[in-house]
Image (cartoon, rainbow, N blue to C red):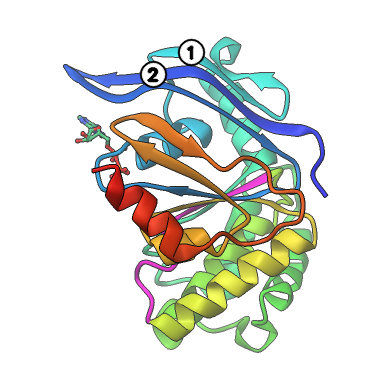
Amino acid sequence: MTGAAVLALREVTKTYGDVGALRGVSLDVAAGELVAVVGPSGSGKSTMLNIVGTLDRPTSGTVTIAGNDVATMSDDALSLLRADHIGFVFQHFHLQAGATAAENVADGLLYTATGRHERHRRAVDALGTVGLAHRVDHRPNQLSGGEKQRVAIARALVGDPTILLADEPTGALDTASGTAILELLRALNAAGTTVLVITHDLELAASLPRQVRMRDGRVEQDSGPDADGAPADAAALATAIRGGR
Ligand code: ADP
């Protein structure tokens, strides 16, 4: 089931000097969707993620997140919007080495008006949600890659974001851990979280209900919201992408 629009991009461009990183991207994502943004290196995926995550502003076009037009917002207002609505997961986890799993997750609530004890309680809860109730006091160097990514996902989720943005979340993991992380993202989505996964892994992308294919700063193809959530055919997607080169 999908619901209200959580994200709308209209003719978004982003230019770095004379490089058009995004060259007119329009995209709508509704509440409850699980979307793969797929495309070769340099196609604009990271630039789009940064703009969707309000870490960067577009050169032109409009970006609406949970009904807020970001162009009209100050940097402070954008920080609040980010804290309220967006959870980030990165390829290399970005955990604090000296902090426990619970402390790392609690950091996800730092920019919200949540007291210290409540932050800890919710962090422990979120670690339970990702299957790490037994690793609350472990530090990153005591965790496997897959466990580190679960901590990062718990940190992204602890603030109950409108949308979870995952940038190559399985890119630094072995196949088994990567598969487990993807299953976790799927389960979180089934429980109601809207998820956007950036990947260059065609098989991963094809296993998700919707694929947005980027090329040269544009959306080359968008399979659109998939009512029954049926995964696409990986081989067909790979052929389509390679065939376009
Ligand atoms: P992807 O994530 O798909 O690999 P990117 O969004 O990183 O693609 O990059 C899209 C294009 O924009 C590339 O040509 C890249 O070199 C360029 N680009 C991205 N970020 C910058 C930047 N900060 N300065 C200059 N060029 C950039």
Q: Tell me if residue 98 comes above or below residue 57 in the rendering.
A: below
Residue shown at 63% from the left, 72% from the top: 184
- Residue 76 placement (x, y as % from top left): 56, 24
Q: Is residue 164 magenta?
A: yes
Q: Position of residue 82 (x, y in %)?
A: 60, 36
Q: Which mark is first along the chain, 1 or 2?
A: 2
The amino acid sitting under disc 1 is: Gly
Callout 2 touching callout 1 (CB < 8 Å): yes
- Where on the picture, by quarter, is residue 174? bottom left
Residue 6 in the image: state x and y as whole percent: 70, 34
On whether residue 109 falls in the magenta region, the answer is no
Please rate how many residues cluster around mark 2, counting C-alpha atoms within 10 Å: few if below 14, some from 14 to 19, many from 20. many
In the foreground, 73 or 184: 184
Asked which secondary structure carries label 1, the reply is strand
| Marker count (numbered) | 2
Above or below: residue 16 compared with residue 60: below
- Could you say whether the residue bearing mark 2 is in a helix, strand or loop? strand
Tell me the residue at 69%/83% (across/down). Answer: 133
Q: Quadrant of ligand 1?
A: top left
Q: Which residue position is annotated with label 2?
A: 13
Label 2 and label 1: CA atoms lie apart by 6 Å
Residue 61 - label: 1
Looking at the rendered image, the quarter that the C terminus falls into is top left
Find the magenta span and give its range: 163-174
Image height of 28 relative to 85, above or below: above
- Residue type at the position of mark 2: Thr
Q: Nearer the viewer, residue 205 or 121?
A: 205
Nearer to me, 223 or 103: 223
- Rendered image quadrant of residue 25: top left
Kindly tell me whether residue 97 is visible in this rendering. Answer: yes
Q: List x then y, in percent, for residue 211.
A: 53, 48
At horizontal 36% and vertical 66% (from top left) the residue drawn is 171
